[in-house]
Amino acid sequence: VAAPRAATMPPSTPVAQAAQVRRIVLLVDESVRGDYIDWSSGNPYTPELARLKDKIVDFGPAASGGNCSHYSNAILRFGAPRDGLGRQLLTHPTIWQYAKKAGFRTVFIDGQAGFNRNPGKLQNFMTSEETKDMDGVYALDEAIAPPALDDKVLDITLNEMKSERPVLLYANKNGAHFPYDRGYPDKARLFRPTMSEVSADSTLARVNSFRNVVKWSVDRFFARLFDEAELKDAVI
């Protein structure tokens, strides 16, 4: 159930005369443990991220503002400071309002909407009122198999980044949710045995399944992103 938001304050930050960045892409991955990202060259787990290390700024691990992705997403979209995660979270301008004031087209992609049974497909405390500040909304449906969801998110992202108008794009990837074996195809079952292959759950099988989905939906995803995206004037 979405939390009610009070009338938000208008964005007060002055807008620069000329935008230095024309494409802002905020990708929200979920259920990916940071210590399963291996930055060492030639590693078998996330070799593409290691290859791209010089192009990526790693801020290190951070503590979440809540114990559920609902709250994490709300903090990202509503922008309350660390010392104001209560009432301010309900009154601050949204990321969409800031972007529109700066002249950006606003786009939201939900790669997890197919698993959402709520009317309207809104989740993470999003309301219909919030969507009024979005110029484009993509809610991926259950017809797309889970291993293909993040590729679809990326396809839409790459297309929207070609816009002549400055664009802010916020996307929820499908990520690496449990059951892990559902999130990658059989051909990507590289670390074995997996949870689907053993008769009883074990730590080894769980770790192998998780490594497979991280390699598929995170490592492979960002390799595609860097290979195919036009990164000039872009921040991701």
Image (cartoon, grey):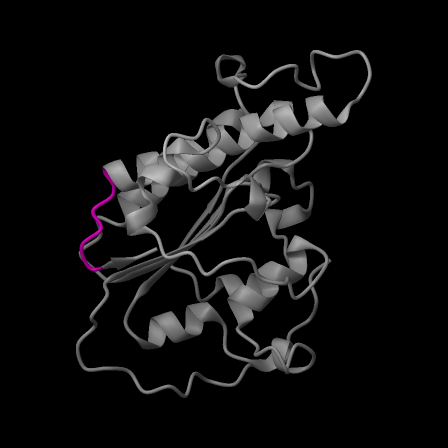
Left or right for 208, reference 174: right
Q: Residue at x 61, y 47 (%)?
A: 121
**Depth check: 207 or 188 in front?**
207
Q: Position of residue 157 (x, y in %)?
A: 34, 45
Quarter of the image where the N terminus is located: bottom right
Q: Total number of numbered labels?
A: 0
| Magenta highlight range | 228-233
Residue 122, compared with residue 176, is above or below; it is: below
Where's residue 217, x and y in %?
48, 33
Please indicate whether residue 27 sits to the left or right of residue 5 in the image: left
Query: From where the camera sits, is residue 188 visible?
Result: yes
**Closer to the camera in the image, 184 or 203:** 203
164 part of magenta stretch = no
Q: Residue at x 69, y 79 (%)?
A: 86
In the rendered view, tell whether residue 13 sits above or below residue 139.
below
| Residue closest to the eye, 115 or 204 | 204
Q: Quadrant of residue 124?
A: bottom right
Q: Residue at x 69, y 61 (%)?
A: 2
- Image spot of residue 102 (x, y percent): 30, 75
Please report the residue visible at 43 percent of the width from the left and 68 percent of the height from the top: 96
Magenta-drawn stretch, dominant element (helix, strand or loop) = loop
Q: Quadrant of the C terminus?
A: bottom left
Specify whether 142 is left or right of 67. left
Residue 211: where, in percent of width, then height? 57, 29
Q: Residue furthest right?
A: 200
Q: Quadrant of residue 192?
A: top right
Judge whether 196 appears above or below 10 on screen.
above
Q: Is residue 227 above or below residue 147?
A: below
Residue 7, visible in the rendered structure: no
